[in-house]
Structure formats: C-alpha cells, structure tokens
Image (cartoon, grey):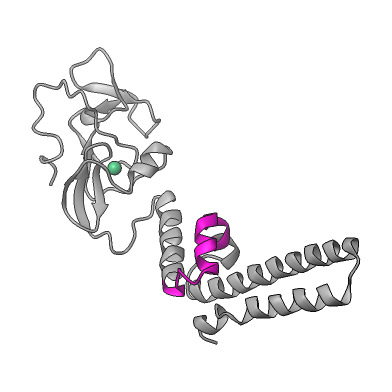
Amino acid sequence: MSWRETLGVAPSTETHYAHNSQNTQKPTELGNCADITDSAYRDSEQESSKLLETLADACLGLDITPVEVKEALAPEDIDDWHNDAISVDTLAAFARSLVQRREMNQGKRPNHYTERATCKHCGPVWLWFSGEVLGCPWCWNRAAVRPIPRPCSVHCGECLHFERIGHPHLGHCTKGEPEAIAGLWDTDRRYCERFLPNPQQTNNNQPRPAKAET
Ligand SMILES: [Zn+2]
C-alpha cells in the first residue's frame, strides 16, 4: 500500500458516515453524546494505528520502533500528518535523525561525519565538513556531560577539566580520566572524549590550541 492510500481521505469520509447513521438511529440526547464520544475515541484509535503503520514504513531498516518515533513527534507534526502535510519520506528522515541522535548520545560518530572540525565550545570534533564552528551537534553531548569522540588527540593543559597542582606542568583531571600517580602532564597528547577547551588559556608556552593539532 502506498503512503497516499494510507493517508488518503477515505477514513475521514467513513467517519462522517458513521456519525450520521448514529445520529439518525439514536435520537436520545444522552445516547447520542455517548456514541459521539465512543466514535471519536474509535477514530483517534484508528488514526493512531494508521500513523503507526506509516511510521513502520518510515522505520524500515532502522534501529528504532514506530512507537519511539511517534513519541518523539510534536503534536504539530501529528497534525501535519493528519493534514497530509508531512510525507513518509520526511518521517523517514526524522526517524533517521532520531537514530543518529541516539548514537551520538552514546558517543558514536555518524558514518557521514568524516571531516575534522573545531567547535569553539567542544574542541576538536567530527563533522560532515571541516573548519571552525561556534556550535555543533556535539554541543548536545557537552551540555548533557556525554562523551564526544575526537578526530585527534588533545593536550590536558588546554582542557577545562585540568586542575593544576604546584608544578609547572602537572595536574589532575577533574573528570577522573585515568592518570599516573603524579598526575597528567599538561603538554602530553592523549585521546580524550571528555576534553573541553579552556576558554581562559593562560599557558604562555602553548601554541594556538585548536590549530596546533595534527
Ligand atoms: Zn560543539
């Protein structure tokens, strides 16, 4: 069945017939109200299961269920769907974006994020283009204190979480990253998904932070 058939006008026409026949057959006021409520309930159930059918198509081959996509849809999106203003392709794109967001939340790089970029707030990140950005999709991870996969290694000395001790180079990670007993050396390169660039760079012997990476 095509999505046009699924979303076609037939269901609402049927609904009107159903209302009409009940109105003529049950003249008493109370009964009438009850029937309308029942009928409205049945209609919304029917609509809901039709939406789930459509979402099942949209979710084909994706690691997400139609129910999960439906729960993520805004009421306006569902209205749009009722009004035929949202296609199954759009729903499929939405489902894909949900899967991607979920994977990113787990610190997984989407397959098409193949370029190395630098986010002002996240540091070195994988994106679908290279360059420097003021904000990025990984900012959601940063805000939720979730790991951010890196395209390159970083220096602890440039990180917000590096707490210096009474030593010119040594410090500790406030995020509990593994370190030697003495601590972490500020200029050592290491791969770190918890790194966040320190906006107040006070090191005097550091090259430019983001651009210095290789
Ligand atoms: Zn960012």
Instruction: Reply above or below: 113 against 206.
Output: below
Name the residue: 54% across, 84% down. 5
| Relative horizontal placement of residue 7, taking residue 124 as reference (left or right) | right
Name the residue: 30% across, 41% down. 192
Name the residue: 24% across, 33% down. 197
Instruction: Reply above or below: 170 against 135.
Output: above
Where is ligand 1, by quadrant? top left
Please state the total of marks drawn on the protein image. 0
| Relative horizontal placement of residue 182, taking residue 132 as reference (left or right) | right
How far across and how far down the image is residue 131, in percent? 15, 49
Tell me the magenta residue range: 69-89
Q: Is residue 74 magenta?
A: yes
For the question of whether residue 112 can be seen, the reply is yes
How far across and how far down the image is residue 33, in percent? 83, 62
How far across and how far down the image is residue 91, in percent? 46, 68
How far across and how far down the image is residue 119, in percent? 23, 42
Q: Quadrant of residue 206?
A: top left
Q: Quadrant of residue 7?
A: bottom right
Instruction: Reply above or below: 81 against 126.
Output: below
Q: Is residue 5 magenta?
A: no
Q: Main secondary structure of the magenta part?
A: helix
> Between residues 17 and 193, which one lies in front from this camera angle?
17
